[in-house]
Image (cartoon, helix red, strand yellow):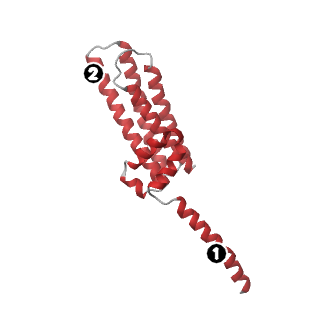
Amino acid sequence: MAAATVRLFLLLPLCLSLTIVSATATVPGPELIRETCMHTKSHHDLCVAVLSSDPKSNTSDVRGLLEIALKLTTENLTKTADFVADFLDEADKKSTEPGLQQCLAYCEDEYIDAVDQLTNAAAALESKVYKDVEKWVAVAITDVKACQQECRDIPGDKRGLTKKNSDIDRLCSITLSINKILL
């Protein structure tokens, strides 16, 4: 009996300290957003702004914040894919410079692939396979960078495609940084 009591008193502080550490590490809200975004280094302010834009972020743990980041990245990427498709249609109708048409056609293919990759990343997140989330988001970044590379020397108005590519690259980087916390 005495041995059991001694063991209980030895284990009780350990259990309480683990509970306190666990609770403080996952308390949802603005502080968790700031702490999570510290892992994004140069994109800290963008990370805070992006995550804070979703009301669910105030009640989310790190996994929930990752889900929000991935969802917003996918939405942004999908809008850019639509922009590229519309721009290509317009360029085809106007018989725009062939180099621009080729650039846009290439980007359209890359963006379709990137959307698929982020869909795969969402499925991996749902299954809590964070290594696969990392893999699929990294492939999406590669697709966006390939578009950027293909179009970099094309003269003329690209209607902000370079900025859109850069924005998506930063959002994907934020998503990867949050995912690394869970690896």
Where is residue 29, by image quadrant? bottom left
Q: Earlier in the sequence, mark 1 or mark 2?
A: 1
* Secondary element at tag 2: helix
Q: Nearer the viewer, residue 83 or 12?
A: 12
Q: Nearer the viewer, residue 166 or 111?
A: 166
Q: Is residue 102 above or below residue 171?
A: above
Question: Can you give x and y, in whole percent of width and height, for residue 145 in the image?
Answer: 48, 28
Type of amino acid under label 2: Glu
Residue extending furthest bottom? 1
Residue at image coords 44%, 41% = 46
Q: Nearer the viewer, residue 140 or 23?
A: 23
Whether residues under marks 1 and 2 lie with C-beta atoms below 8 angstroms apart, the answer is no
Q: How many marks?
A: 2
Q: Is residue 115 above or below residue 63?
A: above
Residue density around tag 1, few if under 14, some if 14–19, many if 20 or more, within 10 Å: few
Residue holding disc 2 = 90
Q: Nearer the viewer, residue 67 or 160?
A: 160
Question: Can you give x and y, in whole percent of width and height, for residue 110 in the image?
Answer: 43, 28
Residue at image coords 40%, 49% = 52
* Secondary element at tag 1: helix
What is the CA distance from the residue labelled 1 to the residue labelled 2? 69 Å
Residue density around tag 2, few if under 14, some if 14–19, many if 20 or more, within 10 Å: few
Where is residue 159, by image quadrant? top left
Question: Can you give x and y, in whole percent of width and height, for residue 74 in the image?
Answer: 40, 40
Between disc 1 and disc 2, the foreground one is 1
Residue extending furthest left? 93
Residue at image coords 45%, 47% = 123
Q: Is residue 168 above or below residue 20?
A: above
Type of amino acid under label 1: Leu
Question: Can you give x and y, in whole percent of width and height, for residue 140 in the image?
Answer: 47, 35
Residue holding disc 1 = 12
